[in-house]
Image (tube, grey):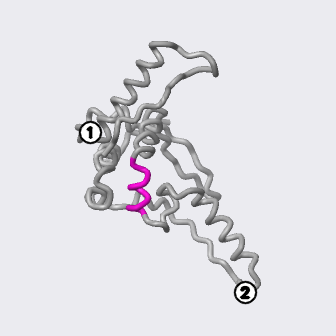
């Protein structure tokens, strides 16, 4: 469950804030995050929130379009994960490096470096999965999140129930 932790919030340069407007913005973002994390919202109401800008990722050969979420979506997502992070780690397990493991990717890089330079290594196979996220069964994934990490289910379902609109 998402708690109502309050941290100080100021925007702008150190030592200056925008006063009441800064507090009002923090409160509005917190209310938005709380609603997305705790209630199922009709997808048409979230269309602008989940929209993404497209950038081109050079895959040599070829180009893969990657959707980048807007700033508000990223702030809300980080706030929700700040509260539910321990539960996400438990649900994802120790092998899922993007599930909040402390320095998970960095540890994997160092481990592969050690394997590569080890005396008993003859070869290492490097594989690049072809955009696996878009090949997932979205409905099965959203059904499973309700059982694997119920406290995160409303936020995930609100964010991924329908494909996002993409803009160049």
Q: Are marks 2 and 1 in contact (CB under 8 Å)?
A: no
Q: Position of residue 130 (x, y in %)?
A: 50, 63
Mark 2: few/some/many CA within 10 Å (<14, 14-19, 20+): few
Mark 1: few/some/many CA within 10 Å (<14, 14-19, 20+): some
Going by the image, does 124 lie left or right of 40?
right
What kind of element bears circle 1? helix
Vertical relation: 167 (above or below) 92: above
Check disc 1 and report the residue beneath it: 43
Check disc 2 and report the residue beneath it: 120
**Is residue 162 something one can see in this rendering?**
yes
Please tell me which residue is depicted at 28% across the width and 46% down the height of the picture: 154
Going by the image, does 97 lie left or right of 38?
right
Location of residue 31 (image quadrant): top left
Magenta segment includes 87: yes
Please tell me which residue is depicted at 39% across the width and 48% down the height of the picture: 84
Q: Which residues are magenta?
A: 84-92
Vertical relation: 105 (above or below) 26: below
**Is residue 138 something one can see in this rendering?**
no
Going by the image, does 27 lie left or right of 122?
left
Q: Position of residue 141 (x, y in %)?
A: 32, 59
Disc 2 versus disc 1: nearer the observer = 2
| Separation of residues labelled 2 and 1 (CA atoms) | 53 Å
Q: Position of residue 122 (x, y in %)?
A: 71, 85
Q: Position of residue 113 (x, y in %)?
A: 71, 70
What kind of element bears circle 2? loop
Magenta segment includes 88: yes
Please tell me which residue is depicted at 44% across the width and 59% down the height of the picture: 89
Location of residue 42 (image quadrant): top left
Depth check: give the residue in front, 82 or 130: 82
């Amino acid at each position: 469950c998402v708690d109502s932790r309050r941290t100080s919030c100021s925007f702008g340069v150190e030592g200056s804030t925008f006063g009441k407007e800064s507090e009002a913005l923090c409160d509005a973002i917190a209310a938005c995050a709380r609603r997305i994390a705790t209630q199922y919202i009709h997808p048409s109401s979230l269309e602008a929130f989940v929209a993404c800008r497209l950038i081109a990722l050079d895959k040599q050969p070829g180009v893969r379009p990657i959707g980048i979420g807007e700033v508000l979506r990223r702030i809300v997502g980080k706030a929700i994960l700040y509260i539910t992070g321990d539960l996400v780690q438990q649900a994802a397990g120790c092998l899922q490096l993007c599930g909040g493991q402390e320095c998970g990717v960095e540890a994997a890089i160092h481990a592969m470096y050690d394997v590569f330079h080890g005396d008993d290594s003859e070869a290492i196979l490097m594989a690049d999965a072809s955009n696996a996220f878009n090949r997932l069964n979205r409905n099965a994934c959203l059904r499973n999140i309700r059982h694997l990490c119920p406290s995160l289910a409303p936020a995930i379902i609100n964010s991924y129930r329908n494909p996002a609109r993409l803009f160049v």
